[in-house]
Image (spheres, helix red, strand yellow):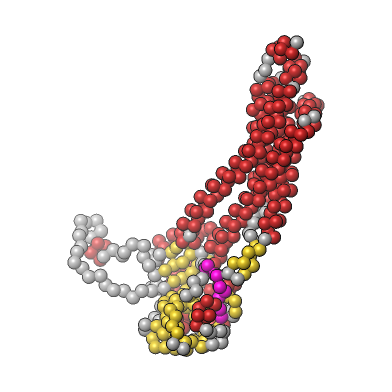
Amino acid sequence: MIGRLGFLISIALRHLSRRKRQTVVAVTGVAVGVGFFLAVSALMVGSQNDFIDQLIDAAPHIIISDELRSPAPQPGTRTFREGAVELHGYKIRTEVRGIKDWQKIVAAVDAIDGAIASPSLSGGVTLRLGGHEEALGIVGVEPEIEARISTIEDQLRVGHLRDLETTQGGIIIGEELANRLGVRVGDIVAATSSSSSARSMRVVGLFKKGQTQLSSGTGYVLLREAQSMLGRPFIINRIGVKLADPYDAQRVAQRIEGQFGYKAESWQERSSDFLSLLLTRNVIMYSVVSAILLVASFGIYTVVSNSVADKRKDIAILRSIGFSEADLQIVFVVEGIVLALIGVVFGWLLGTLLMEILGSLRFSIGGEDERIPLDRTARQYAIAAAASFAAGTVAAWLPARKASRVDPVDILRGAM
């Protein structure tokens, strides 16, 4: 059996060696298709992975806020749950915003293996300096905990989050806001809110320009400083949660919300629109690169079809001496597989070269030199090879199937 298969393979190789020009054209087509498949796929998947990593790392995996997805039921509705009750004309009690018993929520989150909870309070203040006023949304945090659940520390041009603890009245603002106010690190600005008088704040850090995760109108202060400035002592209105497995955020968020009632948004929910766009982009991308490989497979189809047409007499002789239809199909399918194999190898080399060129390009984004993120994993090479082998095998099998069904008597009679 092995000897017979080797003989059939030798016939296929001899066919290809005698049609060098067509063989080179077919191999080149497959190589170009595989090479551009690798380059485009690495570019698209790499940028997607980089974007998702930024979504995951830039902010907490889950954000618990002092909101409710649906209004709390009225006492009458709760009392007569099974009855036909209609309430009207009642006055809704005004409640102070904030997360009640937030310490219990933090303790419950910390009890989850690998999870970290960071309480914070956000609100609005006005910064004043020399008659110039700027509105600023401040976030009061515990620096040591906040640094563990987000990448804020990496986005600072100057300073550190821990400087908020070591400097009385410290505040971290963005470079753009600092430029508008004309301040630098170490300068003092006045900050006022609707519930407190003006107080002096010292700039201890600056966020980099162009950070999409941070608004230019956002600043960070110590949690107790924010509670004092906003007149909300011992109150928080947000809890950030970081998990060991970020892709488990949706399940954990639903569990927390069901247990405590407060709205818990996972990073997937907050970014659902972007993730839907990425899915649409992936469908378009793989459709385009698959079309490239499909076009490349036509070269294999042409080579095998011409080989079948030129070897009709040889096919008849092989059939007449006992070769089966399956044997003939193997011969021509092997031709397609060999063409695909050689094309894949050269395509890998071309794709690697294209990725090196793309990876060497630098772009200035937000004042920072950034490289194009690429996915160079073996998975991309495997997908390209599998798609090429599948297309090449089908392209070769179609004419091989037709050739194996030809009656050798008709061929020999026509040749006489």
Question: Splitting the image into 4 quarters, where does residue 99 fall?
Answer: bottom left
Q: Position of residue 195 (x, y in %)?
A: 37, 84
Q: Quadrant of the C terminus?
A: top right
Confirm whether the magenta stretch covers residue 270: no
Q: Looking at the image, which is closer to me, 340 or 154?
A: 340
Q: Is residue 209 magenta?
A: yes
Q: Position of residue 359 (x, y in %)?
A: 68, 58
Residue 137, compared with residue 265, is above or below; it is below
| Residue under the point 48% across and 64% down | 62
Q: Name the chief secondary structure element in magenta.
A: loop
Q: Residue at x 51, y 71 (%)?
A: 214
Q: Quadrant of residue 185?
A: bottom right
Task: Give the residue at x 64% y 52%.
Answer: 42
Residue 20, compared with residue 103, is above or below; it is above
Can see residue 249?
yes
Depicted 387 relative to depicted 120: above or below:
above
Q: Nearer the viewer, residue 135 or 276?
A: 135
Magenta region: 205-213
- Tell me where residue 222 appears, x and y as whole percent: 49, 81
